[in-house]
Image (cartoon, rainbow, N blue to C red):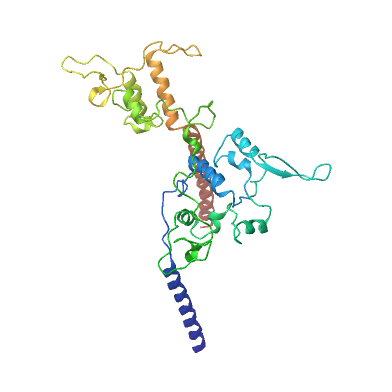
Amino acid sequence: MRNFLRILSLIILFFGATYNSNAAEKIEYLKTDWSFKGLFGKFDRGALQRGYQVYTEVCSSCHSMKYLSYRNLAEKGGPEFTEAQAKAIAASFEVTDGPNQDGEMFTRPGKLSDKFVMPYENVKAAQAANGGAYPPDMSVLVKARGGGVDYIYSLLQGYEDPPIGMTLDEGVHYNKYMYGNKIKMSNQLSDGLVEYSDGEMFTRPGKLSDKFVMPYDNVKAAQAANGGAYPPDMSVLVKARGGGVDYIYSLLQGYEQAPVDVSLDDGVYYNKYMYGNNIKMAEPLSDDLVEYGDGTIASKEQMAKDVTTFLMWAAEPHLESRHKMGFKAILYLIILTILVYFSMKKIWSSIESEV
């Protein structure tokens, strides 16, 4: 028993010392808001495309990304370059291939299926070009380093002059976030080092994956075009307004001449279903404003009903499937209740007969 207590004490002292050591060496990394963090996190497409540009122009001369292929650049959930853009990126690199029919290796433009081109032919060549240090592959660097993205983000900004009294060997630099504070990689980033190529916007035909096109570039432009009022987004308008579909249906048909004792400012209209009866949106519907492809008469009432129905679908696109699921659940419970009822009846009848 005495030996057991001694061993237990040694274990406690060991882990206590380890904990204190780790606590003393713990580094507070720089923090930023990562779009991909959290249960519903998503990658910022712009950040991914700009990040690839920084890697290409700054990092790729030394660091490989051997687990990535050029086709990954066009995949959903990644940078999402178009297929044409990804093909152009791949073709801008010379890839060693072969052997050909003569048994010789040759170079060709890259293809989507090719892995990212390596900056060096082998480890020895990489070490020779970097003072004996081997630049690590960056494919899974974030996962391979303790601290993850916060560590990499901090390391890239952690270069400083060494404290007084610290001497560094030639080719070694001080970085307050590097383990041991010494790093052979020089400071790679500086303001204006790259010129981001996402400054120019372009247009293309829409795809099924695109969101509905916005009518204005931004809120200010929308307000400027509507007398200072901002037209609300209609995706969930039915759910956001008290009264739901009945309110929207009524509002679209509620425009009238203002009562004699009511005065309205310029650009303001009277609507008996609007809260306060004042609305800045002019009456949007009138008979025969649109021509239905199925021959339906486009009365104001019909158009109000149809667009309200569409808004209800936009707010609840899975309404029908939920109703079907609910019906199946109720039917299942009814059948289960009947089975339980007859089962219990049979059990009790057998008990009563025995009694």
**Depth order, front residue of 107/308:** 107
Q: Is residue 104 above or below residue 277?
A: below
Q: Residue furthest front?
A: 170
Q: Which residue is drawn at the image coordinates 67% and 59% (left, top)?
A: 124
Q: Give whichever of 83, 12 is nearer the camera.
A: 83
Q: Position of residue 262 (x, y in %)?
A: 18, 18
Most extreme residue toward the bottom is: 2
Instruction: Give the residue drawn at x 24%, y 14%.
Output: 257
Residue 239, relative to residue 4: is it above or below?
A: above
Residue drawn where x is 52% and y is 66% of the image:
169
Residue 129: % across, % down: 62, 56
The number of numbered badges drawn on the structure is 0
Residue at 74 percent of width and 44 percent of height? 97
Q: Residue furthest right?
A: 102
Q: As drawn, is 288 to the left or to the right of 279?
A: right
Can residue 221 be spotted in the picture?
yes
**Relative to the observer, which residue lies in front, 344 or 61?**
61
Please say whether residue 231 is visible from this viewpoint.
no
Q: Which picture quadrant has residue 314?
A: top left
Give how far across and how far down residue 237 sits, in percent: 37, 30
* Coordinates of residue 216 in the picture (x, y in percent): 39, 26
